[in-house]
């Protein structure tokens, strides 16, 4: 990787760690480039079974690189929307790759997840937090609208009224409240955070990759489609799964009271 982001692997579990805590792991040019490079490769990685995204130095991600934004304004590099749209399209490109990975994405938040950093966190399937984590959609304080797909993710997690309250006030939500309103699933100590994320990731590796990918894809549309549409997707997916080699092997082992194997597709 490029130094702003590191990639480690333990079996089928891959961990992406943001490693610029001095800048509060802001989404610098290097950080954005690192995510784009890593996710382009991981989207083609047939050996990956789960992904963990986390920060370092007691910080998850403070969002946009405001110092760089100010420098760009002073240098006359931002004169109109045409100067911003390519940056937003680049951000959205790798966020969509992260969202659409066919494996579980577990986000481990230690410290602040602010602005686009909150958007990055909520792109995961499961969000875990340390008891010193905090969440903030602070765009209103710098004259911006929420980004990082927060218009989609946050209302679905906390409800539209609560999402608007966070958007409109820019207030900070501490870990305990974040768990209560649905932003994160669990709160641990900072020391227990990554071990818990790894334990969950290993548990989620023990499944048919095809069945998991289909489950993730359909559940990702659960709040957008009506019941009949979801029933159709369910039937189509089950027709794939119940004719797979994995299913045939698994039910045979189940009837023989043998442990399932997880190296089938």
Image (cartoon, rainbow, N blue to C red):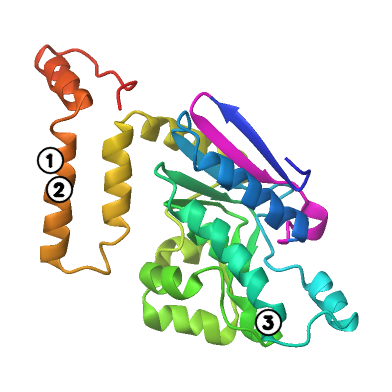
Q: Residue at x 65, y 37 (%)?
A: 7
Distance, label 1 to label 3, CA atoms, is 46 Å
Q: Residue at x 45, y 78 (%)?
A: 163
Distance, label 2 to label 1, CA atoms, is 5 Å
Indicate the secondary structure of the residue bearing disc 1: helix
Q: Is 263 covered by the magenta stretch?
A: no
Verify CB contact (< 8 Å) between mark 2 and mark 1: yes
Where residue 240 appears, x then y in whole percent? 18, 38
Q: Which quarter of the image is occupied by the C terminus?
A: top left
Which residue is nearer to you in this view: 248 or 128?
248
Residue 192 in view of the camera: no
For marks 1 and 3, the one nearer the N-term is 3
Verify CB contact (< 8 Å) between mark 1 and mark 3: no
Indicate the secondary structure of the residue bearing disc 3: helix
Most distant residue in the right direction: 75
Task: Point out which mark residue 239 bears.
Answer: 1
Alpha-carbon neighbours of circle 1 within 10 Å: few (<14), some, or many (≥20)?
few
What residue range appears in magenta?
Answer: 11-27
Where residue 258 appears, x then y in whole percent? 19, 12
Task: Point out which mark residue 236 bears.
Answer: 2
Where residue 68 appears, x then y in whole percent? 82, 70
Q: Quadrant of residue 118?
A: bottom right
Where residue 219 appears, x then y in whole percent? 28, 55
Q: Which residue is tagged 3?
A: 82
Which is in the foreground here, disc 3 or disc 2? 3
Which is in the foreground here, disc 1 or disc 3? 3
Alpha-carbon neighbours of circle 3 within 10 Å: few (<14), some, or many (≥20)?
few
For marks 3 and 2, the one nearer the N-term is 3
Residue 156 in view of the camera: yes
Most distant residue in the front direction: 82
């Amino acid at each position: 990787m490029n130094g702003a982001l590191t990639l480690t692997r333990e079996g089928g579990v891959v961990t992406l760690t943001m490693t610029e805590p001095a800048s509060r792991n802001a989404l610098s040019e290097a950080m954005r480039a690192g995510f784009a490079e890593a996710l382009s490769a991981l989207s083609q990685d047939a050996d990956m079974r789960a992904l963990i995204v986390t920060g370092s130095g007691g910080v998850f991600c403070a969002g946009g690189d405001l110092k760089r934004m100010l420098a760009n304004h002073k240098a006359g590099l931002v004169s109109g929307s045409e100067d911003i749209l390519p940056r937003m399209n680049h951000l959205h490109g790798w966020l969509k790759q992260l969202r659409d990975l066919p494996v579980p994405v577990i986000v481990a938040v230690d410290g602040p997840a602010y602005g686009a950093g909150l958007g990055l966190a909520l792109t995961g399937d499961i969000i875990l937090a340390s008891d010193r984590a905090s969440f903030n959609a602070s765009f209103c304080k710098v004259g911006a609208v929420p980004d990082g797909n927060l218009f989609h993710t946050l209302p679905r997690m906390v409800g539209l009224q609560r999402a608007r309250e966070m958007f409109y006030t820019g207030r900070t939500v501490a870990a305990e409240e974040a768990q209560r309103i649905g932003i994160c699933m669990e709160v641990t100590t900072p020391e227990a955070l990554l071990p818990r994320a790894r334990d969950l990731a290993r548990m989620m590796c023990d499944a048919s990759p095809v069945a998991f990918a289909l489950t993730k894809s359909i559940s990702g549309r659960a709040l957008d489609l009506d019941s009949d549409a979801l029933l159709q997707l369910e039937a189509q997916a089950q027709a794939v799964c119940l004719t797979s080699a994995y299913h045939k092997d698994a039910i045979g082992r189940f009837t023989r009271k043998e442990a399932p194997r997880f190296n089938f597709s």
